[in-house]
Image (cartoon, rainbow, N blue to C red):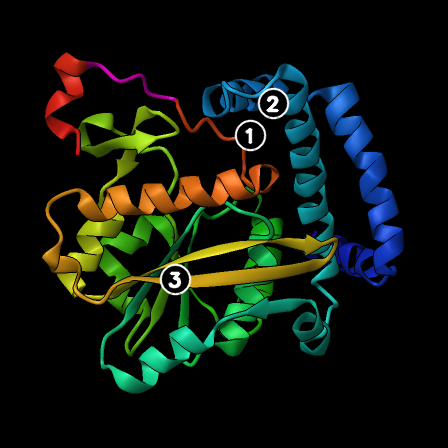
């Protein structure tokens, strides 16, 4: 099946960008107006995040989000045949801040971000530019064919990929040297009783403890990356140093700082965030979770 699906997707990727975006516009109409993919979740999330906005303003953000979401899918297919030279023309970043750390310290880096668009383009460019070997954590896809296609794409420029279920106990089986670990750390925790509850869009929200715990255990430099679309097919990443001394922070404080960075980035570019995932799946309960509040 791989030898049927991959050539088909590769052939589609050879279409010009403008043709693919024309297709994306058609898909947007189907996904938003006909199928309404997770529209209820998206609008509920936007109401929680932006209660001060009018319904019309939130719907506009939702529509722009769906455009970005579909563009990400189409652009990911396009990446199957896109050269690094083309990627370089469509991407800017202050990567000198990361590469300078490689030259001036012997520490590793934990690069934290949110679920912004388009993470596949960012991954390929980060691996291409970074002096640090770039490491990503991935959730294996159920479909073995698509899993292989995505793994091959993501590893193309040398990204070291670690399966999520191997990350906690077997990280160093994959990574033997220095590294910059990219983490989208804004996913819902599987257990809210093992989380840091921090303010996020004016309500207490659980965040996974792993990134903070890992940064402290490994004494890694912590950075934040905000990446976003400049115009269709063109992206920028802004890196910001959070700390070179993670153990100087009290329990939960690094998580709180991270949540503040994500919220600030989302407020700047509201349609650039993955609103289709249930960010506020868990409701805060003082009796159950009060001791976990940072």
* Mark 1 lies on residue: 276
Where the C terminus falls, by quadrant?
A: top left
Query: Reading the chain from its start, which is encountered first: label 2 or label 1?
Result: 2
Query: Reading the chain from its start, which is encountered first: label 1 or label 3?
Result: 3
Which one is in front, 142 or 110? 110
Disc 1: CA contacts within 10 A as few (<14), some (14-19) or many (>=20): many
Q: Which residues are magenta?
A: 281-285
Residue 258, compared with residue 289, is above or below; it is: below
* Mark 2 lies on residue: 38
Disc 2: CA contacts within 10 A as few (<14), some (14-19) or many (>=20): some
Give the image quarter of residue 150: bottom right
Query: Reading the chain from its start, which is encountered first: label 2 or label 3?
Result: 2
Q: Residue at x 62, y 51 (%)?
A: 145
Q: Residue at x 17, y 42 (%)?
A: 252
| Secondary structure predominantly adopted by residues drawn in magenta | loop
Q: Secondary structure at mark 2?
A: loop
- Where is residue 134 drawn, in percent x and y? 42, 70
Disc 3: CA contacts within 10 A as few (<14), some (14-19) or many (>=20): some
Residue 284 falls within the magenta-colored stretch: yes
* Mark 3 lies on residue: 240
Task: Tell me the distance, in whole angstroms, between the alpha carbons under discs 2 and 3.
Answer: 32 Å
Which one is in front, 84 or 95? 95
- For the residues bearing labels 2 and 1, Cβ distance under 8 angstroms: yes
């Amino acid at each position: 099946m791989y030898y049927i699906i991959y050539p088909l997707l590769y052939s589609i990727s050879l279409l010009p960008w403008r043709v693919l975006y024309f297709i994306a516009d058609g898909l947007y109409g189907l996904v938003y107006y006909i199928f309404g993919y997770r529209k209820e979740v998206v609008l509920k999330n936007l109401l929680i995040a932006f209660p001060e906005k009018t319904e019309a303003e939130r719907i506009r953000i939702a529509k722009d989000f769906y455009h970005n979401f579909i563009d990400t899918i189409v652009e990911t297919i396009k990446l199957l045949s896109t050269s690094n030279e083309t990627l370089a023309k469509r991407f800017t970043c202050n990567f000198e801040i990361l590469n300078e750390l490689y030259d001036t310290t012997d520490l590793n880096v934990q690069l934290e971000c949110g679920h912004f668009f388009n993470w596949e383009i960012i991954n390929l460019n980060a691996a291409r530019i970074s002096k640090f070997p770039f490491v990503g954590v991935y959730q294996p896809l159920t479909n073995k064919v698509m899993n292989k296609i995505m793994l091959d794409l993501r590893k193309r420029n040398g990204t070291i990929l670690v399966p999520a279920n191997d990350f906690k106990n077997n990280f160093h089986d994959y990574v033997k040297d220095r590294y910059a670990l990219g983490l989208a750390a804004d996913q819902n925790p599987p257990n809210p009783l093992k989380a840091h509850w921090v303010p996020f869009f004016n309500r207490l929200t659980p965040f996974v403890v792993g990134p903070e715990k890992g940064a402290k255990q490994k004494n890694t430099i912590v950075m934040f990356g905000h990446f976003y679309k400049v115009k269709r097919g063109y992206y920028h990443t802004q890196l910001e140093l959070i700390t070179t001394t993670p153990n100087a922070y009290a329990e939960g404080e690094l998580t709180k700082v991270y949540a503040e960075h994500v919220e600030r980035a989302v407020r700047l570019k509201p349609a650039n965030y993955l609103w289709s995932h249930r960010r506020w799946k868990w409701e805060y309960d003082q009796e159950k979770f009060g001791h976990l509040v940072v």
